[in-house]
Amino acid sequence: MGLTAYAAGRPSALLVGVPGAAAVRLAAEAEVRRLGWASASSPASASVLVVCGDPGPSLAAAIDAAWNGVPSPRADVRLSSPGTVRAALADVPATLADLPGQRASAVTGSWRPPAAAEPEHGHGHHMTGAVHGLAMAERADDRDGLKLDVLHLPFGPVLPYWPDGLQIRMAVQGDVVQSAEAAFLDPSGPDFWDEPGARRRAAAHLDALARLLGVAGWRAQAERARLLRDAALDGTPAATLLPRATRFARRVARSRTLRWMTDGLGVHARLLARLDATTTALAHLDDPEPLPPEPDVLGVLPSLLAGRDLAAARLIVAALDPRP
Amino acid sequence: MTPVWTVVALPVALGVLTLLAASGNAVLGAAASGAPAPLRHWDDPLRAAARALVQQRRRTFAADRLLSRVGVVTLPVAALLAAVVLPLGTRAVADWSVGVVWFNAMEVATWAAVWLTGWGPNSAYALVGGYRYLAQGLAYELPHMFALITVALGAGSLNVTRVADAQDGLWFGVWMPVAFAVYLVSALAMAFWGPLAHPVADDVASGAAVELDGPDRLVFAVGRYALLVVAAAAAVPFFLGGGAGPWLPAPVWTLVKTLVVLGALLWAGHRLPVLRMDRFLEFAWIVLIPASLLQMLVVALVVLD
């Protein structure tokens, strides 16, 4: 059918990163951009799920849950090395346009978004009834001493502009975070960003900046950060790289709206520091030092998130950008 | 009497401009993010529409599908109904004496639309997006209404055609700059577009729209672009002299002015990050409301004189 093939020509891709395998994700992001595909922000809006790396068991379970939410016609692509990206994505339009194959694999029934499927751990005695087999929310005092419903909400690992493999389980009242537990799902092997070299260091900062700008709702600049990141890793000469990076850094740092939305959370200061670190690294490309190890941000994250609303919490996570 | 051609021309014009807005936005977005060959993205909205039409419908667990659908369908319907009072050149489909109020009432229906769309799927991110829009409504609606009242006050009429005619020689956008600026901000807000797209922002995986798939996603997207088009088109009779202009006929001037405002709104969408509702609400109540009231006072003094 013409319509199916036309839609399959440039599908909408949802990328899922695996901790440590950033190289695969970078290659997939670049290929998706080259092909001109749309980038999906949720399983429902995706037609292709691209898993960048080999996930461990708990990450794989989360990916399966997301896959259940992708409507047919759909394709899932599992990538284990950067070299396989181009060939694997090239096959996707044909898979999507193959109607008999799609019909055979289509699923029926309703799907539970991971958020709604979350069981209420160990609070069964608060349950006053069940709706559709789901426990009613428990209640607890909020920050103003009011008794309000508590919802347990996992953030990640399948979420746009989110660190690869991170999952934060938040207990929220309204949209205010009461408590949070952060962990990486199945971290393994050496991190891609741990290799020495100023290019690697600048690229790591740009990758984090792309997430922060994306969370701040500035897709255009997030995409520019990714382009610069790829250029830094591609060996683009410093003479062309540095002016581009400086222009980008100046534009982002000068945005008053971004300052207005991110100050008071410690986010804007971190944004400026990262921009600064990026241009410094690019100005000294012969410097072989690796990215200095980040302090244990994962450990302090829960205390920083408590009492914040979800929008602020996501900005804080993106600004700290924990690594496994 | 309403000329019959306007009844046909209005939905056609709205449809064409909606497609143009979606297409133009895809190209603008690709160019703003430095993508290779941005022009090839002109048919992204058509491909997304094709995808939506051939897609299997998925259902979230324990969803309220009726409310969800009502919310989704309300968006384009509200946009079309809001547009009936706007003059296509010199004639509106409905040349009502309370056109300004009608426009405002229809556009407020988006509050219910986005809230229901967020509520329906039984999904936390969607719900967060839904109530972000209610907060957004609390922020933009009062300044927006004051801006519209200021316009009606300046024209001495709530009829949209008379409002446009009252700007003989001097556009309201020129001598009521604050009301015009407030209107443009609220135009972005009513279509939850660009910097005011917090209800469908990426930090909650597109918020109110997170669970939409198939035709629902298509209708929601069409409704949103149509709202943006109507918001831009309404700025023309309210602030930019309607169809008035040298040499060209009124419908052409209306179209040209609409495209300029629409282009500016689309451009703003890629130029600025998203405004967080807690901070924007504060700004709206401390700055926008007093500013729009002062503007109204100034206009009232001029009119009384």
Image (cartoon, coloured by chain):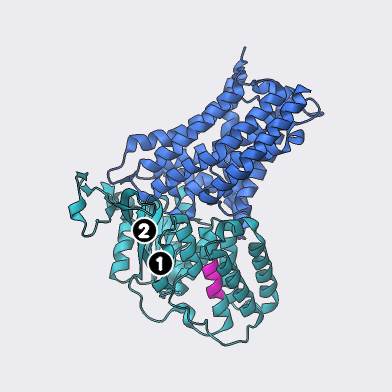
Chain colours: A cyan, B blue
Q: Residues within 10 Å of mark 2 (few under 14, many from 20)?
A: many
For this orientation, the residue located farthest to the front is A145
Name the mark on residue A178: 2
Q: CA distance from mark 1 to mark 2?
A: 10 Å
Viewed as shown, does residue A304 lie left or right of A198? left
Q: Position of residue B290 (x, y in %)?
A: 64, 39
**Which chain letter matches label 2?**
A
Q: Is the residue under label 2 in contact with that under label 1 (CB below 8 Å)?
A: no
Q: Residues within 10 Å of mark 1 (few under 14, many from 20)?
A: few
Would you identify the image quadrant in which residue B80 lies? top right
- Picture quarter with the C terminus of chain A: bottom left
In front: B191, or A135? A135
Q: According to the image, label 1 marks what residue?
A: A303
Disc 1 secondary structure class: helix
Disc 2 secondary structure class: strand
What range is drawn magenta here? A203-209
Viewed as shown, does residue A306 lie left or right of B263? left
Name the mark on residue B221: none
Three-letter residue code for mark 2: Gln
Determine if the magenta segment contains residue A204: yes
Determine if the magenta segment contains residue A268: no
